[in-house]
Amino acid sequence: MPNTDADAELCDIEEIADFVDDFFLEGSGPVDGIDEETAEFCTTIQDGTSPYPASDPYFLETINERWQCCFLDWDQECQSLYDEFSIDTRFNSDNCNSGNLNLVDTLLQKVLNVDTVCCNTWDNYCQELYDEIELGTYVPYKNKDQLKRVDNVGMHEQIFLKLQKESPEFKQLYYSRQADLINTTFSCDNMLNTLDSLIAIIDPEMNRHINRWGRSYSEWKSNVSQLRTFVEDRCNNLSDGLINCYDLDGPYNLTLEVFPEGAGTIDFNTLKDISSFPWNGQYYGGIENLIDADPGSEYDFLRWESKKGQVIFPNESSENAQFMMQESDTLVAIFALETAVEDLNGGVELTVFPTPSSGMVTLEYNLLNTSMVDIRITDMLGRELRAFPSERIEAGREYTKEIDFRSFNSGSGNFILTINTESGSANTKVTIVN
């Protein structure tokens, strides 16, 4: 479940991931909780869809954790929550040690076959195993020792952390999606406007509901005030959470523009078809942002232009590109009428292999025009790590160059190899894994 405490630890995985995506979908339920007397009026009690009476303590725990189980319907998630709250009753060490576990629950025996610690300690890891076995989604892991219980962190969380560590694509998507949401749906302005619009709908009906169900209008207003404070605290904390948990820096102000006006749209990370410009947001250093220029019917894409000269990968003329912020910037997608497109690739064809590499890579390149050429290597922030002497290269010949990244202590990470010619430049990304 999402961590919805206003003062929750910033580095809680569920806080950043689940809370951001689910807060407005799940809701936070009544502020003071639902007691047994109030539970008698639950829709699921009135229509008989709840298999448990309002007096059942586990039913009360369930509807206070997920109020939809009271007011909407009793679905599989409600049942799973109920099972989780009642697990101590259904399972204990006496049942386990007596050898009668199969008589209690055959699924629990399957859980024990995976992890015998669950016999005496039932935690998030055990519950996730139980749920996966029950749903038929459990898959035995070949490297099971890498997914063992760590500080009461369940298997899903461990897979999440493993993906973050080992998959640059997942890491980029995860970070950028949260940043996109913070700038749009979950911005303070948008969340508070959403709250105010709901209050405006509910407020005229409150006295009628109070007359029927009790309590007072002033108490409702107090609860609304608490909810507003909660939203303000949480939307401000989301940005701090990304920075502190994932070693990002910023945020930096970002402005997106197109030139000429109306010539095309921009996709930025998971935000598609941005068409109203200038578009403003705040983004973070330390993670790549994906940019995609989509020209209008009468235009071709020409190039990207960073007003601060930040690196665009693989090069400024690529419609689908990446760039990492290290300061506030304005990024412009420049388009031209179809008859006026320039060749800005520098007349260079290049290949680097292998990538990823442990250090040694081979660069193969050729030019369409004879030119002086210099080659340099930078990190993703544009800091130069190695520059090779300029040399004159003849057109139409394939040149090969061996480059040892270990010779300049690059370490692991992504780097940009740039070939500059008299007519332009071309870039390619190199991944080094030590």
Image (spheres, rainbow, N blue to C red):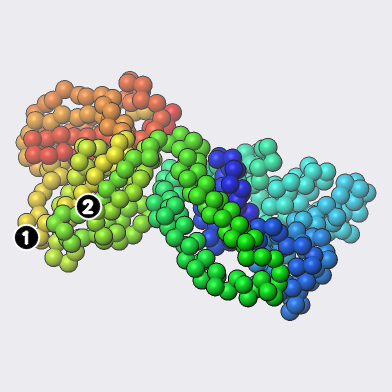
Q: Is residue 298 left or right of residue 40?
A: left
Relative image position of residue 20 (x, y in whole percent)? 51, 53
Q: Nearer the viewer, residue 270 or 125?
A: 270
Q: Is residue 353 left or right of residue 21?
A: left
Q: Quarter of the image containing the N terminus?
A: bottom right
Q: Which residue is tagged 2?
A: 257
Q: Residue 423's image quarter?
A: top left
Q: Is residue 3 left or right of residue 420?
A: right
For label 1, the crowd category at 10 Å Cα-Cα, with few meaning under 14, some 14 to 19 and many 20 or more, is few
> Which residue is found at the position 43% from the left and 58% from the top?
190
Q: Which residue is tagged 1?
A: 339
Q: Quarter of the image containing the C terminus?
A: top left
Relative image position of residue 10 (x, y in whole percent)? 55, 40
**For residue 387, above or below residue 53:** above
| Mark 1 vs 2, N-terminal side | 2
Any part of residue 28 in sight: no
- Give the secondary structure at mark 1: helix
Any part of residue 103 in sight: yes
Amino acid beneath label 2: Glu
Number of numbered discs overlaid on the protein picture: 2
> Which residue is found at the position 15% from the left and 34% from the top?
420
Relative image position of residue 34 (x, y in whole percent)? 73, 62
- Give the secondary structure at mark 2: strand
**For residue 61, above or below residue 377:** below
Amino acid beneath label 1: Thr
Q: Is residue 49 left or right of residue 263?
A: right
**For residue 298, above or below residue 301:** below
